[in-house]
Image: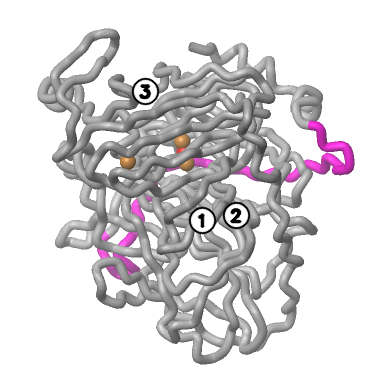
Amino acid sequence: MINRRQFLTRLSGLSIIAAFPLPTLAAGHRRYQLTAARVEHPIGGPGKPVSPLLLYNGKSPGPKLTARKGEILEIDFQNRLEQPTTIHWHGIRNLNEMDGVPNVTQAVVEPGEQFTYSFPVRDAGTFWYHAHNRSFEQVARGLYGPLIVTDSEPSENSRDIVLMADDWRLDEDWRLDEASFGSLHDWSHGGRLGNWLTINGESRPEIPIPKTGFVRLRVINAANARVLSFQFSRKAPMQIIALDGAPCVPFDTATLRLGPAQRADIIVQADPDLGSLYEVTGGGNFEAARFISKPVSKSVLENISASPWYSYPDIKDAKLINVHMQGGAMGNLTSAEFEGEEMPIRKLALEKQKFWAFNGQVGGYEHLLADLNLGDTAILRVFNDTRWEHTMHLHGHHFWVKSKEFGQETHEVLRDTYLMAPGETADLVFIADNPGLWLFHCHALEHHAGGMGGVISIS
Ligand code: C2O
Ligand code: CU
């Protein structure tokens, strides 16, 4: 456990700059103010009843934060909630003490308290930020927003469009279904699945696009647990140019499938017939957003980089970390260790609300999966021995994976969250170049809360 005072004294601009070698980059500061508070918000749309959401700066999603690569992002955060919280900067290869994991990288920010997050952004790409305490509830109530880092000075650009998707669960009265938070069924099955899809906080919004040329769509899945699949009504192919912020060798896909927390940057030809973005899970075409052609003044797409942040490492001397994932409904886990005691799964479920284990141990912030030396190359060999898909996220690093997420063909990609099929074994290969305690967990937030998590120590 880390006490709060230690954190405050460790916050100095100098130590931040020293932590990353960024020789060619000028360390400009970019400041934002974020306040988390309860807001009565009509999530079902204008005129519908309001629900008690938890939002950043009163907005759903929270404000779009932008920065230029190499800058130091400084966020003055105020917690006006009635519960403690933290903010995680998902996908940023961050300083450990700015990573926002309660009691692992910082003490929680208590109600009424303030915390300054300050860190350099060393990569350009599509990221997001979200609450990381009781995230199964705080994120479901709206505590998240986009974070876009660009190579040049950020500006409004009508060819660069963020589409942040969420899957809310509303009751018959169009209110957020609060009674189902903590549902044992959700935690042991596929997580909290909703019935109300929003893009940038609205159902079926109109998204202005230029009349000709190409646009870059930055699609972010902020849902607790829903895997989302998108297509264009025109059946235009989507060219994927980046995954989880990191550039990839571009490839086409007809359907864009994103697990919770995943992002994809896609390039598409803008024309008046682009039509709509459909969500196609379950076979039907559900209109998620409608593209509306607009004449535009500013119309230059930023240069698109195809070079990865780092190349596939040499794995000859790599350290192997085995993670055997078990549990959940219809699974093969009969008992697991929890707080030092072996318990049958029934007791874990009913008394502890735990359903999942890594290597026979119910995961949590104390569960150490590996102890690496700084600079090691590591292979996280993850075996999904469950009946469910899992969207596995590593903090502080992007890993290489031979992805089976895009149909028959395997794509070797760098990303921070990997959507695994039941029965799949995947090697997540990374260079442990960022010191600290880093979480590895399922981003189906109910699975995480139910035991799918552990920590990798790098020193
Ligand atoms: Cu998006 Cu542990 O987080
Ligand atoms: Cu999971």
| Residue farthest to the front, as pictured | 316
Q: Are marks 2 and 1 in contact (CB under 8 Å)?
A: yes
Instruction: Tell whether position 422 is magenta.
Output: no
Which residue has dot 3 on it? 364
Please tell me which residue is depicted at 44% across the width and 45% down the height of the picture: 143
**Amino acid type of the residue tagged 3 in the rendering:** Gly
- Per the rendered image, the range of residues in magenta is 21-49
Q: For residue 126, which numbered disc appears in the image?
A: 2
Answer left or right for 128 relative to 225.
Answer: right
Where is residue 433 shown, x and y percent of the image? 67, 29
Relative depth, front residue between 334 and 83: 334
- Name the residue at the bottom extreme: 272
Compute the Cα span from label 1 to label 3.
Answer: 25 Å
Q: Position of residue 355 (x, y in %)?
A: 22, 30
Residue 67 image position (x, y, % from top left): 71, 51
Q: Are marks 3 and 2 in contact (CB under 8 Å)?
A: no
Picture quarter with ligand 2? top left
State whether residue 240 is above or below residue 354. Answer: below
Q: Mark 2 vs mark 1: which is more N-terminal?
A: 2
